[in-house]
Image (tube, rainbow, N blue to C red):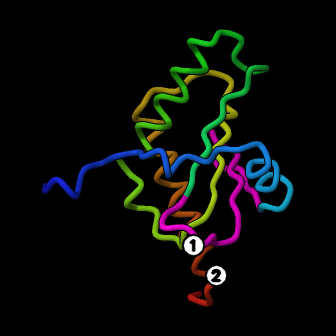
Amino acid sequence: MTSNDRFTFKESERLKGKTTIDKLYKEGKSFVAFPFFVTYSDPIQKEGSQVLISVSKRRFKNATDRNTAKRRIREAYRLNKHRLEVAPMQIAFNYIAPKILDFHTIEQKLISTFKRLNKLNQKVNGGG
């Protein structure tokens, strides 16, 4: 693995800004792939996809629990984002499971979510 192949999650890959996030939730498409509620946009004019990871305060009262879930999702995304073969888009992953799942389970579910996004992208681009 060369220095250019590092698994990173750069600042430019994070979806930020109230207006940008509001627009994504208002105009984006969504689906449920347990334990995630995924909202995604049409392709954007950026170099790479932008991602938002959210864990509900209503579902997890303790900040440490929310942070643990977000940390596991971020790590799974960072290690597997190369499997996401879509045009650059904005994606929000909302964690909806009633309890915190182990890292391996979250990683497998995120990979299956990537496969679903890839399949949706192929349909949009006329690939099948």
Mark 1 sits on what residue?
119
Q: Position of residue 79 (x, y in %)?
A: 35, 46
Label 2 sits on a secondary structure element that is: helix
- x 62%, y 90%: residue: 126
The range drawn in magenta is 29-49
Residue 119 versus residue 15: which sits nearer the camera?
15
Q: Position of residue 20 (x, y in %)?
A: 74, 52
- x 71%, y 54%: residue: 39
Is residue 30 magenta-colored? Answer: yes
Three-letter amino acid code at the position of disc 2: Lys
Is residue 66 magenta-colored? Answer: no
Q: Which mark is residue 123?
A: 2
Label 1–label 2 contact, CB within 8 A? yes
> Looking at the rendering, in which quadrant would you find the N terminus?
bottom left
Placement of 77 over or under 1, stated as above or below: above
> Looking at the rendering, in which quadrant would you find the C terminus?
bottom right
- x 55%, y 46%: residue: 14
Whether residue 61 sits left or right of residue 48 in the image: it is: right
Distance CA(mark 1)–CA(mark 2):
6 Å
Residue furthest out toward the right: 26
Q: Position of residue 15 (x, y in %)?
A: 61, 48
Placement of 97 over or under 108, stated as above or below: above
Q: Position of residue 73 (x, y in %)?
A: 50, 36
- x 38%, y 51%: residue: 80
Residue 31 versus residue 40: which sits nearer the camera?
40
Three-letter amino acid code at the position of disc 1: Lys
Whether residue 85 sits left or right of residue 38 in the image: it is: left
Q: Which mark is residue 111?
A: none
Which quadrant holds residue 120?
bottom right
Which quadrant holds residue 83?
bottom left
Placement of 111 over or under 102, stated as above or below: below
